[in-house]
Image: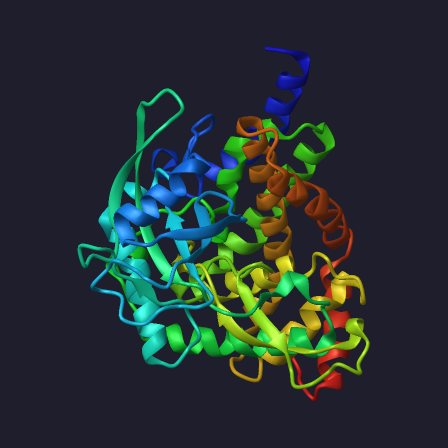
Amino acid sequence: MTEGAQNQSQNISYIEDQVNELNVDESQTLLNPNQKNRPLIPNNFIRDFALKLYGMDVLKFEELDSFEDRNYHIIVDPVINNAYIEDFSKTGYVLKVLNLKDSKTSGFIEAQHSILEHLRMKKFPVQEVVQNVEGRMWSLQGVPNESNEIVGPYIFHMMKYLEGEIAITKPYVTATLFNIGKFVGRLQNALKDFDNTFLRERDFQWNLAECPRILDFVFALKSKEDAQLVNVIIKEFIEEVKPVLGQLKKVLIHGDLNESNILVKEHGDQSSVQMEKRTCEVVGILDFFDMHNSYTITDIAILITHMSTECKFMDPLDVGGHILAGYTTERKLTAVEIDILRILICCRIAHVVVMSEYTLTLDPGNKYILSYVDRYKPLLSNYWNTSKAELHERWKIILKGYGRII
């Protein structure tokens, strides 16, 4: 063992002892170090799969950003050889390929389709699943690699492309953040009466309430200082968050309320308004593939974390105040939830940084993952170096401007 490895092992030894007290069964984690999980799909096979599985002649396609799955926005010829498709989507479709782990059980994909149907019944703007040529909602397919060996198999399914622009493409202004917070409050209210056995029992790698699991991947961090900081953050989680989780109710949450899963559009005609002042309303929510059984406050921590990146027109530390102002018009926060929110935000940022650097050990040229490292490391320092008292005071001042309190 190298000297650096010995130092890092010593740094995390105390934390690992504490993690054992959480009764985390590491054999149940969804991802193990050095395990490749993302689908291996050659681009030249996308047209073949769309034609074979859905009777669609692809005119053009582009791969969409995704951390573990593969998603392709495809535009197809209006003449579709599929008796189960009655109305043509002019905006196209999204061909989705699940990662290797999630492709191992039908319960996962069926749960995804159930939640979409639940929300569609409640008039929420979510994607609509498209049946394949056999009338099925999904199929399991092996994929030939460059050596003509079959890899996988992976679950393929398709949805109609949902119109709107992802939030990251628009400036984060106060009114937009308020609208996003309000929408998420409505979303959580709509999920209150949804239940699914598979999701309730799902053991999920990105469950923020079990963030000490990221210690298994800290070895991937290039910086010793980064590794030490992650250790300290996890220690604070164990000391501050773990003891109070029993006071919170577990529910099924979205799990990945990030800047690419929220669709927005500009509110009314703002052509005469400067771009950095234009406000947006939420018109859609994407990607329920991280849905799991946890706590609503962890979803809010995830939302604030991701909306704090690319924030060019205000201090990122103020983002939470505007989001909470909108959120609390729909749902109330308890004193316990407010108290642990800062450390949950720090844990989510740490989780993103660790897993991004780990993913780069498997896929060094992945520019999408590289962007996560570049954006989230400075954000982690920003939040961590701001005390809970200072952060709460900033938020209270913002909420007061909306006539709200926490």
The picture places residue 368, in percent across and down from the top left corner, at 61, 43
Residue 393 horizontal side relative to residue 37, left or right: right
Q: Quadrant of residue 116?
A: bottom left
In-front residue for pair 398/62: 62
Residue at 52% over, 83% down: 330
Q: Is residue 23 visible?
A: no
In-front residue for pair 270/171: 270
The picture places residue 51, in percent across and down from the top left corner, at 31, 48
Residue at 51% over, 42% down: 212
Residue at 44% over, 45% down: 69
Q: How is the image coloured?
A: rainbow
Residue 253 horizontal side relative to residue 239, left or right: left
Q: Quadrant of residue 180?
A: bottom right
Q: Residue furthest top?
A: 1
Is residue 86 shown above or below 182? above
In-front residue for pair 79/1: 79
The picture places residue 125, in percent across and down from the top left corner, at 44, 75
Is residue 303 shown above or below 71? below
Q: Quadrant of residue 290?
A: bottom left
Is residue 298 shown above or below 149? below
Image quadrant holding the C terminus, namely: bottom right
The picture places residue 148, in percent across and down from the top left corner, at 33, 23
Image quadrant holding the N terminus, namely: top right
In-front residue for pair 219/90: 90
